[in-house]
Amino acid sequence: MCNGCVEEFEFGTQNFEDLLVIESTITDELKLQEVLISRTFRLENDGPLPESNATVSVIDDLQVEYVFNEAEPGRYVSVNMFEALAGRSYQLQITTNDGKSYSSRSSVLPQKTQIDNLYAEQVINDDGVEGIGIFVDSFDPTGNADFYRYEFIETYQIIPPFYSDITLEILSNEPPVIDIGPRTREERVCYRTEISNKIILNNIGTLSESNVNRFMVHFLPPDDEVLRNRYSILVRQLVQSAEANQFFETLKEFSDSESLFSQIQPGFIQGNILSVNNADENVLGFFEVATVSSERVFINFRDILPGVFRPDFQVRCTLLTQRGATNNGIREVIRLAETGFRLVTFDATTNDYIFTTPICTDCNVLGTNIRPDFWVD
């Protein structure tokens, strides 16, 4: 007999520094710009605490001020739409609720570079997995754009395997009376949108030409559930300054570590935002001014990976049959409906009611039935 035990490790923050965290990218897109302000948090806490009731503005080199209001805790949105302009510099200014002031270094809008081509191809990644790669081609004829950052937004269809156009209506529990009617809302095709949280950088400063050629922004393995039905990805290409690239590169090295206990520990990551009142106070974050180019591509799994089985549905779906030929049988049908099961089919010959879980028949469980304006079938 061998005895073994595992001692539970209770992790916690040993040395905690309460810092202001500021995130903002002002772009050349005419839109409502945003500034996010929060505070650092301990590992054992649920998440960052928003910094509310701050005074936020962006000022350009001509002393034009763009005022921001707090739309929700910690999220500040410009009162009016505006766009960063070429040749102008911009500075973020913040005063917190306790009267402390912070200011960024001035940032100039970089050279704009358009995405020339966004496309999907069958590819084998570095781990030897065959899947779908999303690639970008871009060219800057001026040769001034060296540092690129990419963001993407995925939108995909959700079609449950056991969709039905009927629903069960309970007319009475005693005596047990039920009826079958039509479903009144769209539950077959829904859409889900997810925003990437990856830091994707591309430095082409070492190349002789400012040419982005077949840069893979995203890789999708063949069993990724987002590919089960029609899929779309919007890629945003941001041209950034050398200072912004260095900040995000350092942040990427820290956040991409495989394990919490094997992370690179870079210490404080210095950004471009400083305290006006106390030169020794650390402020975490970066105020960036960037140009943006966006493109969207739609993908059908079979077009890229012919002969490969499409991904399974998000969950394993099963059917449950209940015969309703007697009052007790109808009571059981009612019980199943009241506990959340959804009717899929009804066999009038055998009085069999066939049920499944909501996620397997109603697409709204995983997404929304509101079709996006940009969607193309």
Image: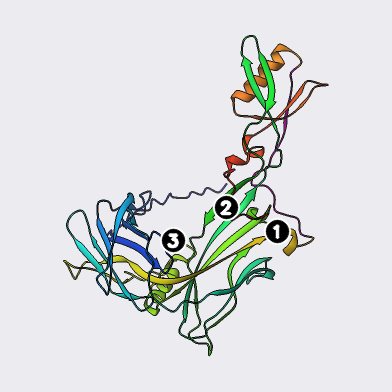
Say what secondary structure mark 3 lies in: loop
The percent position of residue 305, horizontal first and vertical second, equals 74, 63
Amino acid type at image mark 2: Asp
Is-magenta flag for residue 135?
Answer: no
Q: Is residue 114 left or right of residue 267?
A: right
Q: Which residue is mark 3?
A: 260
The image quadrant where one finds the C terminus is bottom right
- Badge 2: how crowded within 10 Å, few (<14), some, or many (20+)? few
Residue under label 2: 373
Q: Position of residue 22 (x, y in %)?
A: 32, 62
* Disc 2 to disc 1, C-alpha distance: 19 Å
Query: Residue 87 or 13: which is nearer the viewer?
Result: 87
> In the rendered structure, which amino acid carries the disc numbered 3?
Leu
Looking at the image, which residue sits at the far top? 175
Q: What is the CA distance from the residue labelled 2 to the residue labelled 3? A: 41 Å
The residue lying toward the viewer, choosing from 7 and 20, is 20
Helix, strand or loop at label 2? It is: loop
Q: Per the image, is 312 magenta? A: yes
Q: Amino acid at mark 1?
A: Asn
Residue 300: image tag: 1
User: Mark 2 vs mark 3: which is more N-terminal?
Assistant: 3
The range drawn in magenta is 308-324
Looking at the image, which residue is at 66% across and 12% down? Answer: 176
